[in-house]
Amino acid sequence: MSHGKAAEQRARRAATARRRLALGSALILLALGGGTTACSQDRPGPPDGTSPYDAAGDVSFGGRTGEDADRAVDPSQPLKITTGTEGVRITDVSARDQAGRTIAGELDADGSAWRSTTPLAAGAEYTVRIATEDAAGRPGRTTHVVRTSQAERAERLQVEFAPEPGTYGVGHPVVAELSEPVTDAGERALVESALRVSSEPAAEGSWYWVEDDLLHYRPREYWPANAIIRVSADLEGLRIRDGLRGGGSEELVFRTGDRVEAVADIAALTLTVKRNGEVLRQMPMTTGKEGFRTRNGKKVILGRESQVRMRGTSVGIAAGSAEDYDLDVRWAARLTWSGEYVHAAPWSLGSHGVANVSHGCTGLSTENARWFFENVRVGDIVEHINGSGADMAFFGNGFGDWNMEWEQWQQGSALAADTPDRPVTSPHRLRPGV
């Protein structure tokens, strides 16, 4: 190799090395956050690079210091944190109890004090993290464990959830029944904010106060098919009002099955059943005649009875009158607590698909009724359309929740900005009745 070519190769290698060095330096600068186009989402550290100092001696809880600071605080009073060192101000406070509940608070403009704005739970232990800054701009950090005393002579607000664990149709709402009525708007908001509902897959939903001691929760649409729903309450020890604190409650976990919907077209006299959007069967039917018209609207299957005794007197028909009846009925799926079912009606078979002749129930042939009975579950939807009967009530006679528009439903939450008057009836409780 000539000296000229050797020199040329050495020059190329040197240039390559310089480019690699320059690229490596640029990458290091980017990694360190340098350069005009890079930015960091981390909070900036102290200007001089020092670590935060221990600020334990700069703060006190309600004016208590030393051994007195470990004494349990009164949960009926706000938690107050102050600075006693000149030039030191509080910059941030976070507090979380052992159940994962956080408390909100307000910081004075000068950073001299912070106080909680949400009630403390009784018999709880809060981990409180405090950030400070001294006159020289040095950051301080300290963590304290604050215990609250047990509440004395207070009733406990218990919450019972429904349905029971199991698998249900996508239309079954969550029901929360309270052991004590809650009427005050602020108390309702406090209780509701402690009620947790989640689903996998996720679904947007909201609570609705049906009565002072009863709430329903439903998604905007039906629950997702084959979902897992978890319901719990973080009320333990929480002060609701004088003499009333939250009690413990059991978590509820239930599932949904396939999305099964039945549409009963009263004018066309047909019942069409779909599963996950696919039509499974269309059947001729009969519904309520004049004077006994079947309700319009969406209804949720409340129960399934392979055989049930139906009597006219149970729905207000006079005993011995021309309309009175006393029948043993097969394959019955209940839609209302007042006695509306989808069931076998072999005595009116000639009218199925022809005329509406029942006392309000949806009648099918024995074969079709058995098929329907075996292919639906509690929580599935039956919607009656194109009828001249009354509309299904939102509450009080089963689950008519899905007949309310979503925007109106949201206003039934105590956490809504505006809560207008809403219909209140004597609603379905956790135990069935007729």
Image (spheres, rainbow, N blue to C red):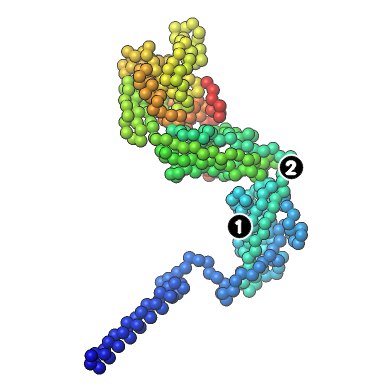
Residue at horizontal 59%, vertical 50%?
100
Q: How many marks?
A: 2
Q: Is residue 89 above or below residue 272?
A: below
Label 1 environment density (alpha carbons within 10 Å; few <14, some 14–19, many ≥20): some
- In the image, 170: left or right of 120? left
Q: Position of residue 251 (x, y in %)?
A: 56, 40
Q: Position of residue 173 (x, y in %)?
A: 49, 34
Indicate which disc residue 94 carries.
1
Is any atom of residue 405 visible in this view? no
- Decide which of tag 1 and tag 2 comes sooner along the chain: 1
Q: Quadrant of residue 406?
A: top left
Outermost residue on the front side: it is 1
- In the image, 77: left or right of 197? right
Task: Work out whether residue 271 or residue 226 is closer to the camera in this orientation and state it.
Answer: 226
Residue at horizontal 47%, vertical 6%?
321
- The residue beneath circle 2 is 152
